[in-house]
Image (cartoon, grey):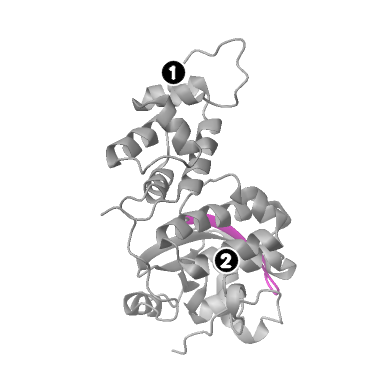
Amino acid sequence: MLERMDRGELGDFLRSRRALLQPSDVGMVVGSRRRTPGLRRFEVAQLAGMSPDYLARLEQGRAAAPSVALVAALARALRLSRDEREHLFLLSGHHAPPAPGSDEHVSRVLLRLLDDLATLPALIASDLNVVLAQNALADALLGEQTGLRGFARSCTYRWFTDPTFRARQPVDDHEGESRAQVDDLRATVAARGGDRFAAGLVRALRAASPEFTRLWARHDVAVRRSDRKRIIHPVVGLVELDFDVLATAQGQRLIVYSPAPGSEAVGQLELIAALGRERFDAAPFVTAEPRRTP
């Protein structure tokens, strides 16, 4: 069944992806008088086997919804990643996943998995980066995440609006973290298909943060499944950990922080566990949802 098509976002996304491609990326010869950044419109149309006029109308937000076959052809022509391809289908009104479950109801499956992860910092967060539950070691590493309401419940919102929240990571990591937050949020907003809280979150971020607005205009999209995080703990200092989404359910993610075997972080986590949350010293990291009581 065809879902809602977002013509404006679709047009912006197609233009932004076309501008990123060079002729050499698709086996074309570069001419000496080339002025257009990226591929020309007719070149993409040729690669996708479609009319340049129809592609122009898609990019201008004036065309009817493209077929599934045409969306697939455009994805191939633009050399889209898996996440970008899924995003293109969603914007075109095809195969949008069901709306995720409520942020207030934590998945029982994920909670059972969380209970089994006592030796690693682990938490459950919504797809909008709202922390819903975390174990004791995550409390000790990150601070108990309680008390906030509204858009501030989202770690993404706080990343772009609260300098003390950003201070929990080294300055050298801020640009990469900002890009990862924005790319993941764009995928979530499309997947939620018109969700009011998600749309309002984007509006609030654009109003509050020029950095977010700059990155949002890039139209990059990538679901955040794994990463490397450097966290500044108020007692043990800089801790370097792998960040992985181990499971998902109902629009929620089980996120685990783990040290590389034999790394300094192994001993640091043991010390953090011994110190416990009591020694977390009013660190600047403060977040949204009440912690689940074991």
Query: Where 8 sits versus 195, above or below?
Result: above
Quadrant where the N terminus sits is: bottom left
> Where residue 132 appears, x then y in whole percent?
48, 78
Residue range in magenta is 225-238
| Residue at left offset 53%, top offset 24% | 22
- Please tell me the numbered disc located at residue 201: 2
Query: Where 54 sits versus 64, above or below?
Result: above
Prevailing secondary structure class for the magenta stretch in the rendered image: strand
- Image-quadrant location for residue 232: bottom right
Query: Where 100 sits versus 34, above or below?
Result: below
Q: Circle 1 is placed at which residue position? A: 27
Would you say 193 lies left or right of 146 here? left
| Residue at left offset 53%, top offset 63% | 199
**Element assignment for label 2:** helix
**Element assignment for label 1:** loop
The mark nearer the N terminus, 2 or 1, is 1
Q: Nearer the viewer, residue 80 or 227?
A: 80
Residue placed furthest toward the bottom: 293
Query: Where 230 sits versus 113, above or below?
Result: above
Q: Identify the amino acid type marked 2.
A: Leu
Q: Identify the amino acid type marked 1.
A: Gly
> Where residue 41 appears, x then y in whole percent?
49, 26
